[in-house]
């Protein structure tokens, strides 16, 4: 029987088949839709508009993807590159970093207590935290632009940022003909960058 049509096949096996059918990679949402079309019994067949349903569906798919990654890597059959925007089955390459690096996301998704212990309030907090980080990323970009470090070829660290901060303060200080508003923007940008680099 064809694995991708067999509802009793393990979710990791079904995902393996779908990834083989999409050599250029596929997004998480498309994977979920294809699983639903194939009447996969391992994921909830409920609208993804409910936050808890969305979380549980996402968790089950990512748990299976990480299990598949470990199995294929262990058997030297391939490597599953995992991100929400593009999940791709890659050939096995001996000697590559592969699974040797510590991956906190792997630990999270392979811990089934995360699925059973997460309620609607937890999901709401996860979403708020995600959007704060996204917004923070915008703040960081804006601060780096203000410091003219957004296109820097140097490795950014707190020492380099503080050096640039001192240059800008000296240049834009009101006692030296600069504006108070500009100095306040520089100080705010420094506060933001300290959160990321200190």
Image (cartoon, helix red, strand yellow):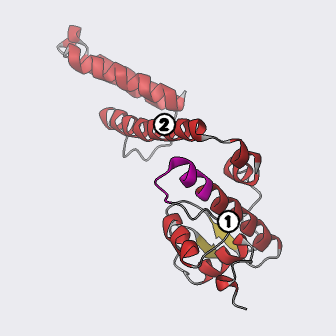
The residue lying furthest to the top in this view is 175
Towards the viewer: 189 or 162: 189
Residue 154: x, y in percent? 46, 43
**65 above or below 175?**
below
Kindly indicate the quadrant of the structure image that contains residue 2.
Answer: bottom right
Residue 56: x, y in percent? 62, 53
Residue 55 counted in the magenta span: yes
**77 above or below 102?**
below
Q: Residue at x 54, y 54 (%)?
A: 54
Name the residue tied to disc 1: 65
Secondary structure beneath label 1: helix
Q: Residue 97: in sight, yes or no? A: no
The residue lying furthest to the right in this view is 75
Q: Relative to 191, is 40 on the left or the right?
A: right
Real-space Cα distance between discs 2 and 1? 25 Å
Quadrant of image for the N terminus: bottom right
Towards the viewer: 151 or 66: 66
Residue 98: x, y in percent? 72, 64
Q: Residue 118: in sight, yes or no? A: yes
**43 above or below 133?**
below
Query: Contact (CB < 8 A) between labels 2 and 1?
Result: no
The part of the chain drawn in magenta is: 47-57
Secondary structure beneath label 2: helix
Identify the mark at residue 138; answer none if there is no mark.
Answer: none
Q: Residue at x 60, y 76 (%)?
A: 39
Name the residue tied to disc 2: 128
Quadrant of image for the C terminus: top right
Towards the viewer: 170 or 36: 36
The residue lying furthest to the front in this view is 46
Residue 115 counted in the magenta span: no
**185 above or below 50?**
above
Q: Residue at x 67, y 77 (%)?
A: 14
């Amino acid at each position: 029987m064809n694995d991708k049509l067999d509802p009793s096949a393990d979710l990791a096996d079904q995902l393996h088949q779908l990834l083989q059918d999409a050599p250029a990679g596929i997004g998480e949402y498309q994977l979920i839709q294809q699983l639903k079309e194939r009447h996969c019994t391992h994921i909830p067949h409920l609208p993804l508009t409910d936050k808890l349903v969305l979380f549980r569906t996402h968790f089950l798919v990512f748990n299976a993807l990480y299990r598949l990654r470990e199995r294929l890597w262990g058997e030297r059959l391939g490597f599953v590159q995992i991100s929400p925007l593009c999940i791709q089955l890659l050939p096995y390459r001996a000697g590559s970093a592969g699974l040797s690096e510590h991956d906190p996301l792997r630990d999270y998704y392979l811990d089934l207590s995360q699925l059973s212990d997460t309620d609607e309030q937890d999901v709401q907090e996860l979403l708020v935290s995600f959007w704060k980080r996204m917004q923070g990323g915008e703040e960081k970009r804006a601060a780096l632009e203000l410091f003219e470090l957004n296109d820097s070829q140097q490795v950014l660290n707190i020492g380099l940022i503080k050096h640039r901060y001192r240059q800008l303060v000296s240049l834009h200080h009101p006692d030296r003909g600069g504006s108070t508003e500009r100095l306040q923007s520089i100080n705010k940008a420094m506060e933001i960058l300290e959160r990321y680099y200190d």
